[in-house]
Image: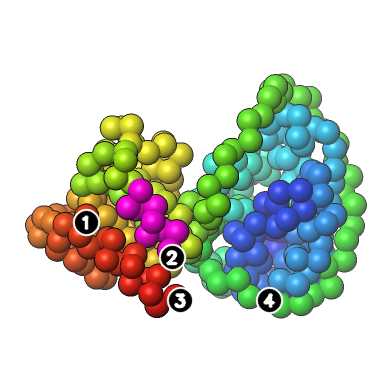
Amino acid sequence: MAEVLVYVDHVDGAVRKPTLELLTLARRIGEPVALALGNGAADTAAALAEHGAVKVLTADAPEFADYLVVPKVDALQAAYGAVSPVAVLLPSSAEAKEIAARLALRIGSGIITDAVDLEAGDSGPVATQSAFAASYTTKSRVSKGTPVITVKPNSAAVEAAPAAGAVEALAVTFSATATGTKVLSRTPRESTGRPDLTEAAIVVSGGRGVNGAENFAIIEALADSLGAAVGASRAAVDAGWYPHTNQVGQTGKSVSPQLYIASGISGAIQHRAGMQTSKTIVAVNKDAEAPIFDLVDYGVVGDLFAVVPQLTDEVKTRKG
C-alpha cells in the first residue's frame, strides 16, 4: 500500500492531538509514515505506533530549536525523498502551514490548506474545505505533484490502530538558508489549565455583550465547568477585555470544536469565519434578530448574565 507522510506536532515527545487525527485520515489513503523532529522525537514512537504509524522517522539537531522553520522544511523534504509518499499531511497551525507551503514550492506540488476532511479518490486524495466564511463546502484535489495538505484540528476522531511503528533515524542536510533567522529568546506561555483553543473539543466564547473584562469571569466559569477553552470575539479583544491570543475569527484563530457556545456575540461575518465549522453551535443573545441565530443549532434569546450562570450551575449539578 502507498505511504502517506505525516508531520508530527509534539512537545518534548508528547504528541499533540491534531497529529493523532492526521494519522486517522492518513489511513484512509495509505499507510502512515510519521516524521518527528527535535527534542524528544524518538519518544513519540509509542503513541504514533498505537495510532497507525507503520514507521517513525526521527531527527534531532540544534537547528530545529535554534532557528525558524527552514530546518524543519529541510527535514520534511529529506523525508519526502526517502518515502516517496502519495500525500504529505500537516496540522493547520501557523508554523505547519508555512512549512507546508515551502515544501510544496520545493517539490513542485500543489497545496491545500485548512482541510476539514480527507478521502481517497481515483486521481489522488480529495480534501474537503470550507470556503467564503464556511458558506460553501468544496472538494479539491491537487492536480500536479504530490499533494501537500494541512488539516484543521478536530476534523477527525482519534482512533487507535496499532501498527509496527518502526523507528528509523533520518539523515538531514541543512540548506544554506536554514540558519538565516535565529530564535533569540522564548517566553513560556502562562498556563490557564484550560485546553488549547484550536484543539479544544468545547469552546465557550464571549463578545461585546459581556460588557467588560471583569464580566469574562462568567464565561470562564462556564468553560471550566465543561472543561472547555475560552474564546473571544474581535470586539471584545479590541476593547481590551480579553487577550488577542484567544480571539476567534478571520483575523484570530479558527476553531472547529464539537461544541461552540457563543455568548453576547452578534455573529458578524468576521467571527463566523473562525467558528462556523464547529459541529454543534449554541448561542445566547438578547437580540432575537442577531445574525448568529441564522447559524446556530440551538439558540437562547435572553440576557447572558442570567442564562450563562444558570447553565454553569446546571452543568455542575449534573456532573456531581
Report the span colored magenta: 217-225
Between marks 4 and 1, how big is the CA–CA gap?
40 Å
Judge the density around disc 2: few (<14), some (14-19), many (≥20) Cα neighbours within 10 Å: some
Q: Which of 172 and 111 is in front in this view?
A: 172
Q: Mark 4 points at which residue?
A: 160
From the image, give the main secondary structure of the stretch colored magenta. helix
Residue at 43% from the left image edge and 43% from the top image edge: 246
| Distance between the alpha carbons at the discs numbered 4 and 3 | 30 Å
**Numbered disc 3: secondary structure:** loop
Residue 233 visible within the image: no
Q: First in sequence, mark 2 or 3: give its number.
A: 2
Q: Tell me which label, 4 or 3, sits earlier in the chain.
A: 4
Question: Up-down: is 95 above or below 144?
Answer: above
| Residue contact at pointers 4 and 3, CB within 8 angstroms | no
Q: Which mark lies nearer to you, 3 or 1?
A: 3
Q: Name the residue under label 1.
A: 304
Q: Which amino acid does label 4 sit on?
A: Ala
- Residue identified by numbered label 3: 320
